Image: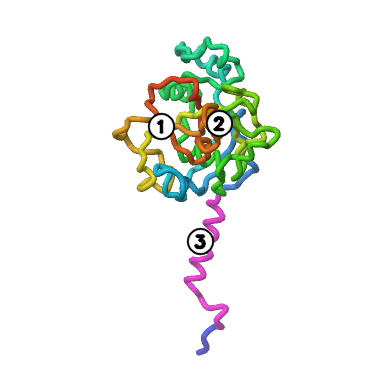
């Protein structure tokens, strides 16, 4: 009795493969088009990016790859006008410099807020503060750049790219949150270098990168010995080296000064 030709023989491996492909096609999500962020926010897709630095300060080492889920992040630092809406709706007390005309124009960033104040605002919006990983990814993209716009500071650039120490950028103190659009990050987020440094969700640990998770790191699980929260971005009192995308800062979560502000994130579900 002759066996059927090879092409017509029953092949369980091929059948299993066909079933897998069919099921994969059925279960794969259908993308209707580009993701539309909420007003005033930018979309950061899921994926890996390079975090940290091989040649920076000890707490910035080592350079390593981190995966984040997709999320939305405020394109601008939270402004005084936005913070005023929060105070009006909740009765939350005003920031420390609320009556200081140098810092209180409506379109300037809200300063004089503690980490707790920033978290209260974020919760009111149904959001939270960004993790260090989310903040850094939104600032530098996937190519490991040193500054949101690239790898060169270019102090002679016109128009100016960031608000740091000095008056050459036209702002001796803070600047409006929608300033310096040419210095936007790869995801269109402004003022990730300079203007105000920004509170992050994480507790700060100088050795965290040595053992941090690869996927969605959120900082130490509890207050480490320093009992400080992470701060990112540099500010109007810093020079270019301290406004690099991977530069890490920290401070007591109760601190309120005219250097720190914040922005919020919303996970993309």
Q: Residue 14 carries which label?
A: none
Range of residues picked out in magenta: 5-28
**Which label sits on residue 20?**
3
The location of residue 173, given as percent across then percent down, is 57, 22
Decide: marks 3, 2 in contact (CB < 8 A)?
Answer: no
Is residue 8 part of the magenta span, yes or no?
A: yes
Closer to us: mark 3 or mark 2? 2
Locate residue 143 relative to residue 118 in the image: left or right: right
Residue sitting at 58 percent across and 38 percent down? 43
Q: As drawn, which residue projects farthest toward the left?
A: 225
Where is mark 2, residue-wise?
Answer: 194
Is residue 11 or residue 41 the one in the foreground? 41
Density class for disc 3 (Cα within 10 Å; few <14, some 14-19, many ≥20) is few
Give the distance between the C-alpha atoms of the residues marked 2 and 1, in whole angstroms. Answer: 16 Å
Residue 24 can be seen in this image: yes
User: Is residue 50 found inside the magenta-colored segment of the image?
Assistant: no
Point 43% across, 43% down: residue: 57
Q: Residues within 10 Å of mark 1 (few under 14, many from 20)?
A: some
Location of residue 101 in the rendering, given as x and y in whole percent from the top left corner: 57, 12
- Residue position for label 1: 250
Which picture quadrant has residue 207? top left
Alpha carbons under labels 3 and 2: distance apart: 51 Å
Of the two numbered discs 2 and 1 on the same chain, state the one appearing first in sequence: 2
């Amino acid at each position: 009795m002759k066996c059927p030709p090879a092409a017509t023989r029953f092949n369980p491996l091929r059948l299993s493969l066909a079933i897998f492909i069919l099921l994969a096609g059925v279960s794969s999500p259908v993308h209707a088009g580009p993701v539309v962020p909420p007003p005033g926010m930018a979309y950061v897709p899921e994926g890996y990016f390079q975090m940290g630095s091989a040649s920076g300060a000890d707490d910035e080492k080592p350079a390593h790859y981190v995966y984040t889920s997709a999320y939305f992040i405020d394109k601008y630092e939270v402004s005084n006008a936005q913070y005023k809406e929060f105070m009006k709706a909740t009765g939350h007390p005003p920031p420390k410099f609320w009556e200081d005309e140098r810092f209180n124009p409506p379109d300037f960033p809200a300063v004089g807020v503690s980490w707790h104040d920033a978290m209260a605002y974020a919760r009111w919006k149904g959001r939270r503060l960004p993790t260090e990983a989310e903040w850094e990814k939104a600032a530098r993209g996937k190519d490991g750049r040193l500054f949101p716009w690239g790898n060169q500071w270019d102090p002679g650039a016109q128009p100016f790219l960031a608000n740091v120490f000095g008056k050459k950028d036209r702002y001796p103190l803070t600047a409006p949150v929608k300033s310096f659009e040419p210095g936007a990050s790869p995801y269109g987020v402004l003022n990730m270098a300079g203007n105000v440094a920004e509170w992050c969700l994480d507790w700060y640990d100088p050795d965290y990168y040595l053992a941090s998770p690869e996927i969605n790191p959120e900082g130490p699980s509890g207050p480490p010995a320093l009992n400080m929260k992470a701060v990112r971005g540099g500010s109007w009192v810093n020079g270019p080296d301290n406004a690099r995308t991977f530069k890490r800062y920290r401070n007591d979560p109760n601190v309120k000064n005219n250097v720190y502000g914040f922005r919020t994130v919303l996970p993309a579900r």
